[in-house]
Amino acid sequence: MQIMNLGSKEEACHYVANELLKQIISNKKSVLGLATGGTMVRVYEQLVNLIRINEIDLSEITTFNLDEYIGIDYDHPESYYTYMHDVLFNHLPSWNESRIHLPNGSAEDLEAETKRYEALLDQEGPIDVQILGIGENGHIGFNEPGTPFDSVTSIVNLTESTIEANSRYFETIEEVPEQAISMGIQSIMKAKRIILLAYGPKKAEAIKRLLTGDITTDLPASVLYNHPNVEVILDNNAYLSEEEDI
């Protein structure tokens, strides 16, 4: 695992956007694993700009998102389908919609949907670059503490802390979905390369625990130590030296 503190949020996001750009340029048929949430907004803003100025055709790029809420329609303003189109896909007309993949949280048969998505990952993958955020409790995707490391795409129950963290996007906390479909930890670990991005003081405790090197299901992100090609990209506020305390 390579850990880099790039000082500022802007530099950290710029690095991730550049790495995605380099992957797209190196292989016009790349498979990208994408994440959502506030952490990624600036990454996608920068990536849109970089793709525009390089005049890159994205029609053969395939994308897979980590997760989607259960209980809200895909066109709900806070669905991850809406998020991805608002911050990335709608800004670049050469994306091929048939190559954009998110779990369907409104599927009539949710169990069948998890199996379909996992099979599609195996069919189209492996993912060349998977980007990740980290939850305040150490989750990756929506794989909450206690999730087995051999988990595959499944229906997951969100913890109170995750619901609370996501409530800032909804008018009331009662509106926040309590379940999601998420890539499993094993699904994530199939990627050839993983980049985890974290910035801001709210992520400092999770990063501090991650940097101890202890591998435990109590901190799902710690499984990344078992992957051969992982980078953790931080800003000053997320990074704490061993001597510092929160």
Image: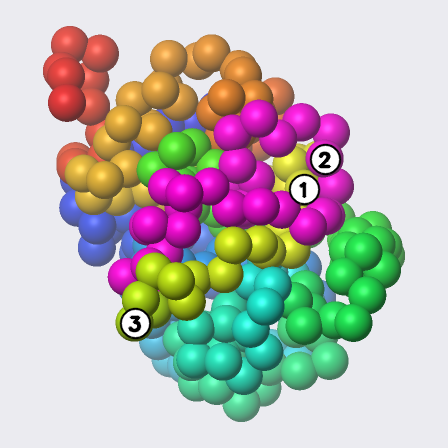
Point out residue 130 in the picture as x, y percentages from the top left corner: 57, 48
- For the point 32% across and 42% down, the residue is 198
Residue lying furthest bottom in this view?
93
- For the point 67% across and 42% down, the residue is 184
Toward which corner of the image does residue 194 lie, by quadrant? top right
Could you tell which of marks 3 and 2 lies nearer the N-terminus? 2
Of badges 3 and 2, the one in the foreground is 3
Mark 1, residue position: 184
Alpha-carbon span between mark 3 and mark 2 = 32 Å
Q: Tags 2 and 1 in contact by the CB under 8 Å rule? A: yes
Point out residue 39 in the picture as x, y percentages from the top left corner: 33, 54
Could you tell which of marks 2 and 1 lies nearer the N-terminus? 2
Element class at badge 2: loop
Q: Looking at the image, can residue 68 be seen? A: no
Q: Is residue 159 magenta?
A: yes
Q: Type of residue at label 2?
A: Ser
Q: Type of residue at label 1?
A: Gly
Q: Tags 3 and 1 in contact by the CB under 8 Å rule? A: no
Report the number of numbered marks. Answer: 3
Element class at badge 3: loop
Mark 3, residue position: 171
